[in-house]
Each structure stands twice: as C-alpha cells, then as structure tokens.
Image (cartoon, rainbow, N blue to C red):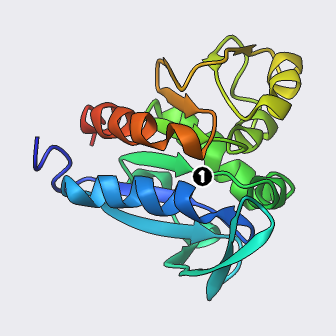
Amino acid sequence: MAHDLEGKRIAILATDGVERVELEQPRGALYGVGARSDVLSIHPGEIQARQWDMVSAGTFAVDRLVTDASVDEYDALLLPGGTVNPDGLRINPDAVGFVKAFVATGKPVAAICHGPWTLIEADVVRGRRLTSWPSLRTDLRHAGAEPVDQEVCIDGQFTTSRSPADLPAFCAAIVEQFSGARV
C-alpha cells in the first residue's frame, strides 16, 4: 500500500479560514502514499488557517487559482472544513463551478466537517448519503441528501466525515477511495 496513489494528483480547494488539521492531515496521508496535491484557492498567495475556527494557525501557500485549474488535471478533490473556509467558497462562483464540474466527472470527492457546504451550493448532494459537522445536517436534508451521523460515510464518489476527531478514519478512507480514481 506504500505507493497506492503514485502519480495521482489531488486538488485541495480551500480559502481563508480553513481548519488547519483538516487540510494538513489528509494531505500528509495522501503524500505518504505517493500522491501529489495542489492547494487551489480563490485568491493568490497564502490562505489563513485556523484551529477550531477561533485560533490563528498559520498559513498555507496557494499553488494555483481555481480559475486557472481544470478538473481534467486532477484525479480526486478534497474539501477541508472550518466554518469560514467553505462559507467563502460557496459564495464564489468559480469555486462552486469547479466543484460542480469535478463531481460531473465521477471522480472521487472527499469533504470533512463544514466542507459539504460547497457541495450543497454546487447542487450535487441530492439523493446522496453524507455526514458532516452536526450543524450542516439540516442544510444537507434541505438540499436533498440523507445526512447520517458516522465518522466516515462513503456513497459512490463521495467520502465525507464529521470533524477533526474523525481524521484517522477519514484519512484511511480517502487513501482507499482515491486509489481507485480514474485517470
């Protein structure tokens, strides 16, 4: 399993307010099995990370603007949470359009915590089983999804998780799901 994702390229869509561990730990797990990743964002430079939304937790370099990226360049998509991050993404038409186009490819998509907000805005959750941070469950239901309360939920191309407490299970699940990604 050491190189399950050798040669795979993962898009990580995030902006200011991203929950640091929800970007850093999955990225590290993917890197550990050979994947490359790009942090895509809605502005250049760096994005501000947070810890539990309240504490500044450094920055991440932006590799590319989402407007300069093509879904065809990536094998999978990761949507980390934090409250502010997906709230900023879901009001950005370029970010929402990228997510919608990515889901249309059928390639794997993973979202943790508040990350499903962007999936909701892209109108791609109808008829799907997803988990999330508890406060999003009503939003998921209103968008036509079936919200569940479990550490990891896999439904077709979607892998979702509730919170940083679920990161060990989430990281293992995305490595497994992304290793089956179509090129």
Whether residue 178 is visible, yes or no, is: yes
| Image quadrant where residue 55 sits | bottom right
Hey, which residue is sitting farthest bottom in the picture?
A: 45
Is 154 drawn above or below residue 182 in the view shown? above
Tell me which residue sits at (78%, 62%) in the image: 53
| Image spot of residue 107 (x, y percent) | 42, 35
Tell me which residue sits at (56%, 35%) in the image: 103
Quick one: 85 or 109, which is closer to the camera? 85
| Image spot of residue 1 (x, y percent) | 11, 40
Whether residue 73 is visible, yes or no, is: no
Residue 123 shown left or right of residue 41 in the figure: right
Tell me which residue sits at (60%, 52%) in the image: 80
Mark 1 element type: loop
Tell me which residue sits at (67%, 41%) in the image: 113
| Image spot of residue 173 (x, y percent) | 37, 32
Q: Which residue is mark 1?
A: 80
| Image quadrant where residue 40 sits | bottom right
Q: Amino acid at mark 1?
A: Pro
Is 113 drawn above or below residue 152 in the view shown? below
Residue 85 shown left or right of residue 161 in the figure: right
